[in-house]
Image: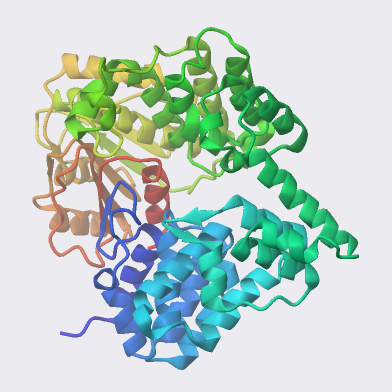
Amino acid sequence: MSTSRELLEMRFKRFLHYGSEQPIYKAGERVSNKYYDLEKIPSLIKLINGQIHQSVIEIITKVAKEESSLWPDSVTYALAYCSHQDFSPELKNEAYKILRLVCKTARDIILFVKFHRELRGTKGGGNGFKRAVGQWYLVWMPFDLADILLHQKSYHGWKHTDVLRIAHIKPISIEQQLLFTYATRGLKEATTRFGESPNEQVQELLEYITTVESFRKIKEPEKAARALAVELHNLERVPTNLLKYQEIWNELITHMDVKTLLDNLQRLSILGFLKNNTVTVLKVVDVFNNLWKAETFKGHPSRVYIELLTYEKAAKYCLEIANKMNHPVSNLVPPKKPPKCNLVIKSALITFFYSLFKFQKPTGLRYLVAVDVRPKMFSDRCHYSLYLTPIEAATAISISLVRTEPDGNVTIGVYREAKGELEVMSFDKTSEINSYDTAFAQVKKGITPGPASVASAIHWAETNKRPVDVFLILSNYMVSTTGTRPSINQYRAAMNLPNAKVVTCSLSGNVRTHKDVEGQNMLSVVGFDDKVCRLIEAFAKGSF
């Protein structure tokens, strides 16, 4: 039986948004877990073979322009395949036209070339590939191109040197000649060839590159810190051996964005730089108190929530988790774990978490969040985010919806023992994390919790005449999907809501997939990461 175009396009949109054509999102990395393989994109191949390539380009362009992909590498891989395939020369040309739209950073273009090379094997790239990749580099202004070549030295074993040689890029100005010589042959050769050039900008570029290279050779932390204060180098340019000194981090944090700071918060803690009220602590707090940095932070508030709990619990659970994962830190003698959580940092993270919700855009839809409160929700750990329990992940999802959506649009309930019964919880936009934790813990003691069931939540909404656009079922892994399809179809008809959707979250893993869910507006989530809340939002709006 042939698959309809509509279904193929839906599957392809799923892949672009989260790296899988199946209606299942599994938390975790994509490139390192080998999500990008020809076997993972049958819908794209069928769309191309069915000569529906214009639809493919339109979908990729839309996702790239809206920046709606949770894993943008998926878009890069799809574009690499479109530019690699030989079935449709027209599609190949169209793919190269949107290369710059999809690949916005140095990391993106390196990854594109890596994917393209893996797909082509020994065949080479062809003139279209060389022209498109060359154009990506040649359109940058000289100092912007210098920053690109200096900033992203390599990614997954690929460097700019590899890209420049594979694409045979020919510079069109003397400034580009200097920069490409530096990238492929090093500073010494660039200085020899262009050191006597009368071109003023060439000399400025050469001085800039020399300054960066000289900084990388500094071994004294005090000297490096002074250089950082003057020249504002970023983290990637600092030699690894200097990153164990506190004065280096003090200078870096001053100009650091929120994402980079969150990525390195545990590192700072393990190094012991977040003890007491040191200069480092004050600088970290300043970043989290910066309103402009909060407004320009592109991540979801759940990213901060995950880091908050990871930082808070690392001292207690670090070695236990490391032993389970056979992490090298567990083999240290004596075993070393991070210092205890600094309450000043914790308070700053909580305040920053709440402040981000003023910048979130509501979907305007109505949600019913049904939460499992059986004991395992409080003791298991989430798949991927190992420092979080499932109930803490449920808190993150619930508080995000309540604080983002209009008042009255989010109903949160917990399962009772009686089939089809929910205990409705009372939360509003002022409810804090502790309020959710306390309420879920108290309701677990006050009632006999029931099993998480999709059909039960739908039955409750229909019985109580609650209009719901999205049913969200949160459990550790025991979500009953029996009777889901007839229940949701009956609800859609009874409430005249034909597009009502169902999302089941198995936060500890081991998902039970819905049978025959293609086209039924159903999605399963396995585990929890900072993408899950955005995923639910995108699915609710019909992005895939």
Q: Is residue 529 left or right of residue 296?
A: left
Regarding residue 162, the answer to whether it shows in the image is yes
Regarding residue 64, the answer to whether it shows in the image is no
Judging depth in this view, the residue of 351 and 460 nearest the camera is 351
The picture places residue 255, in percent across and down from the top left corner, at 67, 33
For image coordinates 49% across by 31% down, the residue present is: 264
Count the marks.
Answer: 0
Q: Residue furthest top?
A: 276
Q: Quadrant of residue 479?
A: top left
The picture places residue 414, in percent across and down from the top left corner, at 23, 29
For image coordinates 63% across by 39% down, the residue present is: 217
Say which quadrant the N terminus sits in: bottom left
The picture places residue 168, in percent across and down from the top left corner, at 58, 79
Say which quadrant the C terminus sits in: bottom left
Q: Is residue 406 left or right of residue 394?
A: right
Judging depth in this view, the residue of 17 and 337 nearest the camera is 337
In the rendered image, the vertical position of residue 414 relative to residue 234, given as above or below:
above
Name the colouring of the figure. rainbow
Judging depth in this view, the residue of 284 and 130 nearest the camera is 130
Q: Is residue 374 left or right of residue 258?
A: left
The picture places residue 364, in percent across and down from the top left corner, at 48, 47
Q: Quadrant of residue 480?
A: top left
For image coordinates 77% across by 33% down, the residue present is: 230
Judging depth in this view, the residue of 417 and 312 nearest the camera is 312
In the rendered image, the vertical position of residue 453 relative to residue 105, given as above or below:
above
For image coordinates 61% across by 50% down, the residue present is: 151
In the rendered image, the vertical position of residue 73 relative to residue 241, given as above or below:
below
Q: Quadrant of residue 132?
A: bottom right
